[in-house]
Image (cartoon, rainbow, N blue to C red):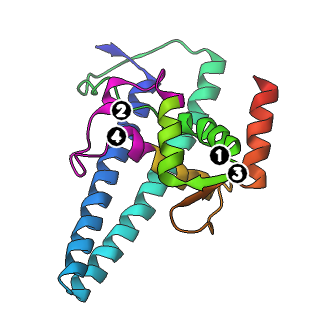
Amino acid sequence: MIENNPEDVSSAFEMLLEEVEAEIDFASGVGARSFERRDLDGAKEALERSAALTTFRDKVAGLRKEWESLTVHRQDEGPEPTDRRNLGRLRRGLRTREAEYYLPILRVLTSMGGSSKVTDVLDEVGRVMKPILKDVDHEPLASEPENPRWRNTAQWARHGMVQEGLLAADSPRGIWQITAKGRERLQSSTEAG
């Protein structure tokens, strides 16, 4: 028997999110190849699948946030750990979580005048986060071997930040832009820390 550990659930969410993201990347690739072949029906089908998977991913990310809020309250209460059935070990060394990219992205965008090209932002975020990124973050993605996992996670973090209103949803393609709410979040984190 092993002790009940809320981190096991958090790890499971991270693994699920990564697998769903890989499926989204695959569907996007199928759509791009279909479009190149002028197979518009295939491209449309892949686009619809990608959109549905992204909606599902957002729901899973929301459930992960809900879980985290439940475990914060649980840890504050300080219950005794209980034994549970061993359902198998989860893979350790999971990627750095998306939420850990939020402040570095906001700081980088602020230092760049509030907006910049995606590649420039990601290059600087990678430099800033280098001390906290895990080995697994530097591994290439199966779907995009030239793209390290951390860059993909940072782009998903951007997606979440847009949903929270921290980054502009209507910025030009290829540009990330901080919003007033993003500046407020950065300011409040600076004052708190």
Tell me which residue sits at (53%, 38%) in the image. Answer: 124
Q: Residues within 10 Å of mark 2 (few under 14, many from 20)?
A: many
Task: Identify the mark nearer the N-term, 1 or 2.
Answer: 1
Q: Residues within 10 Å of mark 4 (few under 14, many from 20)?
A: many
Residue 54 painted magenta: no
Is 60 placed above or below 101 here?
below
Residue 109 tag number: 1
Q: Indicate the secondary structure of the residue bearing disc 4.
A: helix
Q: Nearer the viewer, residue 163 or 117?
A: 117
| Image-quadrant location for residue 117 | bottom right
Task: Identify the mark nearer the N-term, 3 or 2.
Answer: 3
Asked if the residues shown at circle 3 and circle 1 are in contact, with their CB atoms under 8 angstroms apart, the answer is yes
Q: Residues within 10 Å of mark 3 (few under 14, many from 20)?
A: some
Please name the residue that numbered disc 4 is placed on.
149
Instruction: List x then y, in percent, for residue 93.
Output: 33, 24
Please name the residue that numbered disc 2 is placed on.
137
Q: Disc 3 or disc 2, which is closer to the eye?
A: 3
